[in-house]
Amino acid sequence: MARWSHLASLAIALALLQAASSESWLYDQFTTDGNIRAYEASGQQVAMVSLDQHSGGGFNSKEKYLFGEFSIQMKLVPGNSAGTVSSLYLSSGEGDGHDEIDMEFMGNSSGQPVVLNTNVWANGDGKKEHQFDLWFDPAADYHTYTVIWNPKNIIFKVDENVIRCFKRYADLPYPDAKPMTVHATLWDGSYWATQKGKVPIDWSGAPFVVSYRGYSANACASGSSCPAGSDKWMNRQPDNAEWGTVAWAERNYMRYNYCDDGWRFPQGFPGECSRN
Ligand SMILES: *[C@@H]1O[C@H](CO)[C@@H](O)[C@H](O)[C@H]1NC(C)=O
């Protein structure tokens, strides 16, 4: 009996410790911008970012990373979200020759599909979009969005489904040398996001709100060694089943593929388009 209660209190103490560490991910790991506040729900810290006519909001990691597995749960803007863009992205910073890995959610009129834009920038070149209609209502509940960035490829996941793999080819640009910070933002993308800018934000629905929770990063902080567990993602490439979900997403939900957009590349498609 005494042993059991010791064990029980140890378990409770550990659970509390764990709760405490997940509770404070926002202010521990990020600086914040604009309209953002944090609250607790079911023992988890939720970062609520909002957009009104004056400002959007977001958070930016304090640490810079070179490779990692990053994931977060997001519940997107409900109802008429046309013109709003929310995101999870990594960036090496402003300026020429920068690297970036993007997941951007382009809002839409009520009932119309929200489009997930995935993109990779290498040395300032970022015309590498794959866009997908989301096959569920991303505002009805939280879904998990993941980026795995390693020296071999960049893998994009929606919940358990790999939807894209951007491979590295030795002779083509790839983000592999510039440390990146992690960002999440909500902003007014009226000028381009929804039906190429034709549908502006309806401010009567403001404030627009996106909720983020369950952030996790297993990533190599630049300048220090990689954390325990990095072997799980450092060499990770999609397996056959995961290439299957990529094909499934492309077949059923792909809305745009830069490698099909000849109009945009009059001098010829980027090199990776003809590989695989
Ligand atoms: C919004 O809905 C329209 C109509 O279904 C669709 O053509 C468009 O791709 C959707 N997404 C965006 C971001 O415009």
Image: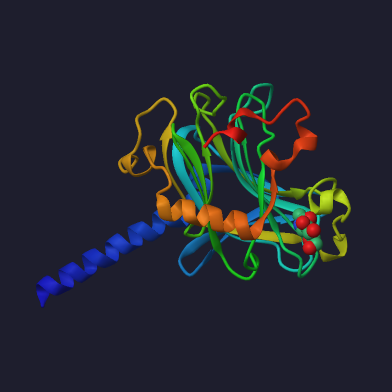
Residue 267 location, quadrant = top right
Q: Position of residue 71 (x, y in %)?
A: 49, 50
Q: In which quarter of the image is the N terminus?
A: bottom left
Nearest the eye: 242 or 176: 242
Q: Where is residue 42 in the image (x, y as percent from the top left)?
A: 48, 70
Q: Which residue is drawn at 34% across and 38% down?
A: 227
Nearest the eye: 9 or 238: 238
Q: In this view, does 139 lie above or below 189?
A: below
Farthest residue to the bottom: give it.
1
Q: Which residue is drawn at 67% across and 42% down?
A: 129
Q: Where is residue 96 in the image (x, y as percent from the top left)?
A: 68, 21
Residue 82 location, quadrant = bottom right
Callout count: 0
Nearest the eye: 7 or 191: 191
Q: Position of residue 255 (x, y in %)?
A: 70, 53
Q: Is residue 168 above or below residue 206?
A: above
Q: Which residue is drawn at 48% across and 55% down?
A: 244
Q: In this view, does 111 lie above or below 164?
A: below
**Relative to 230, 112 lies left or right:** right
The colour scheme of the drawn protein is rainbow
Say whether residue 79 is visible.
yes
Say whether residue 206 is visible.
no
**Relative to 68, 173 lies left or right:** right
Ligand 1 is found in the corner quadrant, namely bottom right
